[in-house]
């Protein structure tokens, strides 16, 4: 059976970042399993029109691979994907990656002290498992009566079907989240009619994105430290938002004022304004900066529908007020399975129970978002309560990777075969996270969002400044872990996988 010291699931920012940093540590005995046909994770999955990051590129990139060539301050998806592909190549991790290889199950084998991974190529074992499969990887399609009866093209925003020509068509977009507000202005000029089905309006402040000038490119290429200075500046200005979101939601009044003025300047029709004015504190759901979303809604071929969807028919959508709208194409910009990510069902720990079963009553919990009791040698990247609503997730992922590398070093120096977080620090940590969460805008802002699980518990976001997470993960803390000694040598020699160059 093929065996590596480490197996990584996913080749997005998290998995690639871990792979690169392992190589930098001189560790080559690892493999990365990626379900898609190429690297990039969410930046490979999402290719809908207008897809771009709403965090500035100087910050939304690896600290060890700044890119002086970003064309815009907020990069479009093809550029972010190309950056990830290029970075994977540059740091020599591509030979480690098995594409089109979905890990369908991962179980801890207590006797062998290994993870057993089921892949389409058969079983693979690894001493350590790093989960880089991401929170926003499983599209959620709405549970609408009659959806399967629809006769025209219907697809999720993260599975965009570019073979479908939208020009001249009647299109419905369900949802007004981060994906929808980018899709709507980008398809509006081409389609005959666009129905935007809105359940909850978003707060939409102005967008500050702009092309990066030639002069800036020259400076970034030639002046060491210039881009890092800008990155730090962006980081600290973004961190100011964390004060309002996590400490004092009243401070978000300014965001409300700016976003309201933005809407009033772009939307003149009072009836439309009324429909799209949110009734919750800004930041409770993700803020969605855009300069072209509201103008698109005011166009003659666009209708914002706020009546709930009662039923989908072969060629139409019927709303609860009985109105039937004929459509040709249905776009579901309806988000992802986050707190109910199906992968949780397929990772099994010491007692054979899955993460889903372990988390059924408590909700998703990990120590520092990374380690879980009963799941030895498992490190989850972008795990529970590591998401953020105001800055770059890459910052959080890199902090976790540093922590994992230090854990691996500690295992080596202690000659430990296993490492598992102790229950007391794990519980104390999660009590503290939830206590801090109570003050945040996500819990007090009066909205429902994908940040909360079905018990209303926020298991997704980090409830504080991100530098505090960085500080907490800077060094591995062995006192909070149990270490296991190696088992007796295995009788049969294991087949080693040739990876890496
Ligand atoms: P989302 O934020 O979860 O938005 C989903 C939308 O679909 C919401 O408007 C939701 O309404 C609506 N919806 C869901 N089920 C529905 C139903 N059954 N009937 C009617 N409406 C329904 O998903 P997303 O837009 O794909 O974004 C998810 C996350 O991905 C973002 O929060 C962000 O973290 C990330 N993202 C980032 C970017 C970027 O950087 N620019 C772009 C895209 C995505 P309710 O609000 O009422 O639930």
Image (cartoon, rainbow, N blue to C red):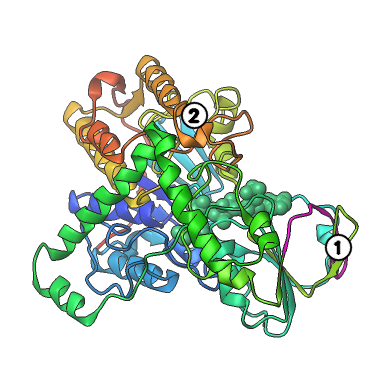
Asked if ligand 1 lies within 8 A of label 2, the reply is no
Residue at 29% of width from left, 35% of height from top?
A: 469
Residue named by callout 1 = 149
- Residue that numbered label 2 is attached to: 349
Q: For residue 163, which quarter of the picture?
A: bottom right
Q: Residue furthest right?
A: 322
Neighbor class of circle 1 (other Cα within 10 Å; few <14, some 14-19, many 20+) is few
**On screen, residue 162 above or below 21:** below
Q: Within the image, what quadrant is residue 376 found in?
A: top left
Q: Position of residue 3 (x, y in %)?
A: 38, 46
Q: Quadrant of the C terminus?
A: bottom left
- Image height of 157 relative to 361, above or below: below
Work out whether residue 471 can be spotted: yes
Residue 338: horizontal and vertical position, in percent?
Answer: 56, 44
Q: Nearer the viewer, residue 339 or 176?
A: 176
Q: Position of residue 12 (x, y in %)?
A: 41, 57
């Amino acid at each position: 059976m093929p065996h590596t010291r480490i197996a990584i699931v996913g080749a997005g920012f998290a998995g690639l970042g871990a792979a690169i940093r392992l190589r930098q540590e001189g560790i080559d005995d690892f493999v990365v399993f990626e379900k898609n046909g190429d690297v990039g994770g969410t930046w490979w999955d999402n290719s809908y029109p207008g897809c771009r990051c709403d965090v500035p590129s100087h910050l939304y990139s690896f600290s060890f691979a700044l890119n002086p060539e970003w064309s815009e301050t907020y990069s479009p998806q093809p550029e972010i994907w190309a950056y990830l592909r290029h970075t994977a190549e540059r740091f020599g991790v591509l030979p480690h990656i098995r594409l089109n290889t979905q890990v369908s199950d991962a179980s801890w084998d207590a006797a062998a002290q290994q993870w057993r991974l089921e892949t389409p190529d058969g079983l693979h074992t690894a001493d350590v498992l790093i989960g880089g499969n991401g929170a926003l990887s499983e599209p959620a399609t709405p549970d609408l009566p009659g959806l399967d009866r629809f006769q025209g093209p219907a697809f999720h925003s993260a599975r965009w079907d570019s073979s479908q020509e939208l020009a001249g068509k009647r299109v419905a977009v369900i949802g007004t989240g981060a994906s929808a507000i980018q899709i709507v202005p980008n398809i509006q000029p081409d389609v005959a009619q666009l129905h935007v089905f809105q359940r909850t309006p978003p707060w939409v402040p102005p967008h500050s994105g702009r092309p990066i000038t030639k002069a800036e490119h020259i400076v970034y290429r030639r002046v060491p430290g210039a881009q890092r200075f800008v990155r730090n500046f962006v980081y600290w200005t973004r961190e100011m938002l964390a004060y309002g979101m996590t400490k004092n939601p009243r401070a978000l009044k300014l965001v409300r004022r700016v976003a309201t003025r933005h809407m009033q300047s772009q939307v003149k029709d009072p009836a439309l304004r009324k429909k799209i004015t949110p009734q919750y504190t800004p930041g409770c759901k993700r803020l969605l900066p855009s300069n072209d979303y509201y103008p698109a809604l005011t166009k003659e071929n666009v209708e914002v529908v706020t009546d709930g969807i009662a039923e989908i028919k072969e060629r139409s959508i019927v709303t609860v007020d009985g109105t039937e709208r004929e459509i040709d194409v249905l776009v579901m910009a309806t988000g992802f399975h986050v707190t109910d990510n199906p992968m949780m069902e397929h990772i099994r720990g010491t007692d054979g129970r899955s993460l889903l079963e372990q988390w059924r009553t408590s909700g998703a919990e990990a120590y520092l978002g990374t380690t879980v009791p009963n799941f030895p040698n498992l490190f989850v990247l972008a795990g529970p309560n590591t998401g953020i609503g105001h800055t770059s997730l890459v910052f959080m992922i890199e902090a976790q990777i540093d922590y994992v590398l230090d854990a691996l070093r500690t295992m080596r120096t202690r000659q430990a075969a296993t490492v598992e977080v102790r229950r007391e620090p794990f519980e104390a940590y999660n009590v503290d996270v939830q206590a801090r969460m109570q003050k945040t805008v996500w819990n007090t802002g009066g909205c429902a969002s994908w940040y909360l699980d079905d018990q209303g518990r926020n298991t997704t976001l980090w409830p504080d400044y991100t530098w505090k997470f960085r500080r907490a993960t800077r060094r591995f803390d062995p006192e909070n872990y149990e270490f296991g000694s190696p088992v007796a040598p295995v009788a049969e020699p294991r087949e080693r996988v040739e990876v890496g160059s």
